[in-house]
């Protein structure tokens, strides 16, 4: 399957117009990114096959690793955002894509006004990051855009991501997920696999894989249903539904498997660039500027131990535990009914 993917993205696809579905199609970027995207070389943009946006907040000076960097679109976009003192490394296994990315390195250095290039590209497999010149605990952020589904060993990828991230760093990535496990007959279809569909994880399998890999509390940032828009492929897929989703996974060992309540709260200072009125941590934590915002212990740690710490005030501590944090949708799983009567012994 790895050879099929290399052939699909290296030889069969010459531009995004050659895709047979809309799975690897991007969404509308926010306004602050549009001027930077307009500066990217046309060939780099044409050979881009992402499914989401992988540019989180507060990137100045950051070290970023892009898994499956392809033609380099995200690498070059992030190179502008991290600035000349930051660094972006792209890893890809496809010679044709790497050749496009490297050919335009000086072009983007000049576009963004850097005296020296702050990007580099490595040829390699994202399942074999331990064979590349990458230092443990070196990266502030690791990204990936519609590539993890193409991996033949997703557990190995997540284990290496954990190893390469700094404490408090994050894996911020977009990918395709299914609403159920994809049958093996479809997984082995090279076109469905290359279109980022049949290699997609069932969403709950991903959550559990993330937890086993040391990311105790994966946070969904945004998602959208994929409509496929190819009748022949839709017929093959049957009732399986697919979604493009962006998750952020923080490398914080103290995170708990569930959202626990310690009576804590945070106040966002409104100081992050492009986020003057509110900061969106995930799809159910939109923290307005200046407002006391109650949080669970995990959310507290994600903010206090990450690059976002200086943009928040922190209220409380971990001295007293009050049970499950109710706003996270979990409740005590036992009957709480005073009229239920006395229990009989078994």
Image: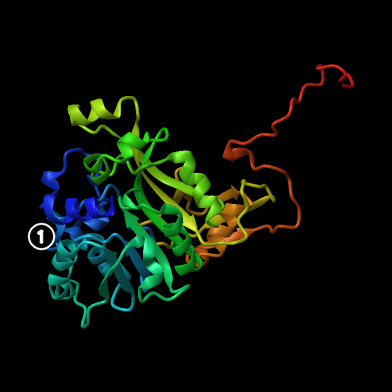
Quadrant of residue 87 within the rendered picture: bottom left
Quadrant of residue 132 within the rendered picture: bottom left
Is 98 placed left or right of 310 in the picture? left
Q: Residue at x 35, y 29 (%)?
A: 240
Q: Residues within 10 Å of mark 1 (few under 14, many from 20)?
A: some
How far across and how far down the image is residue 286, in percent? 47, 47
* Position of 201 relative to 238 (above/below): below
Q: Residue at x 14, y 65 (%)?
A: 100
Residue lying farthest to the bottom in this orientation: 115
Q: Which residue is mark 1?
A: 43
Element class at badge 1? helix
Please name whichever residue, 193 or 284, is drawn nearer the observer in this view of the structure.
193
How far across and how far down the image is residue 26, in percent? 24, 47
Please name whichever residue, 41 or 214, is drawn nearer the observer in this view of the structure.
214
Q: Residue at x 48, y 39 (%)?
A: 204
How far across and how far down the image is residue 20, in percent? 16, 39
* Position of 137 relative to 53 (above/below): below
């Amino acid at each position: 399957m790895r050879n099929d993917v290399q052939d699909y993205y290296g030889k069969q696809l010459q531009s995004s117009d050659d895709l047979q579905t809309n799975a690897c199609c991007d969404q509308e970027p926010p306004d602050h990114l549009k001027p930077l995207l307009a500066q990217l070389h046309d060939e780099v943009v044409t050979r881009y096959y992402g499914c989401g946006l992988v540019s989180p907040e507060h990137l100045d000076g950051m070290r970023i690793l892009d898994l499956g960097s392809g033609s380099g679109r995200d690498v070059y976009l992030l190179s502008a955002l991290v600035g000349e003192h930051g660094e972006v490394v792209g890893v890809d296994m496809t010679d044709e894509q790497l050749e496009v990315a490297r050919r335009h390195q000086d072009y983007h250095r000049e576009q963004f006004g850097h005296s020296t290039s702050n990007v580099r590209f490595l040829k390699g497999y994202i399942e074999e990051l331990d064979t590349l010149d990458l230092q443990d605990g070196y990266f502030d952020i690791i990204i990936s855009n519609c590539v993890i589904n193409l991996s033949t060993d997703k557990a190995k990828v997540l284990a290496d991501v954990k190893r390469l991230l700094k404490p408090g760093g994050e894996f911020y990535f977009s990918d395709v997920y299914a609403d159920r496990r994809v049958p093996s007959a479809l997984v082995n279809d090279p076109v469905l696999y290359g279109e980022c569909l049949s290699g997609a994880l069932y969403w709950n399998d991903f959550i559990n894989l993330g937890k086993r890999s040391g990311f105790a509390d994966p946070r969904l940032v945004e998602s959208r249903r994929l409509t496929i828009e190819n009748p022949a492929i839709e017929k093959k897929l049957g009732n399986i539904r697919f979604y493009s989703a962006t998750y952020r996974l923080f490398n914080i060992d103290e995170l708990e498997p569930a959202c626990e309540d310690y009576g804590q709260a945070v106040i966002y200072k409104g100081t992050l660039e492009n986020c003057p009125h509110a900061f969106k941590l995930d799809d159910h934590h939109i923290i307005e500027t200046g407002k006391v915002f109650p949080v669970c212990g995990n959310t507290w740690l994600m903010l206090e131990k990450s690059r976002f710490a200086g943009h928040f005030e922190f209220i409380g501590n971990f001295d007293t535990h009050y049970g499950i944090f109710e706003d996270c949708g979990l409740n005590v799983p036992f009957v709480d009914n005073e009229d239920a009567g006395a229990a009989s012994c078994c």
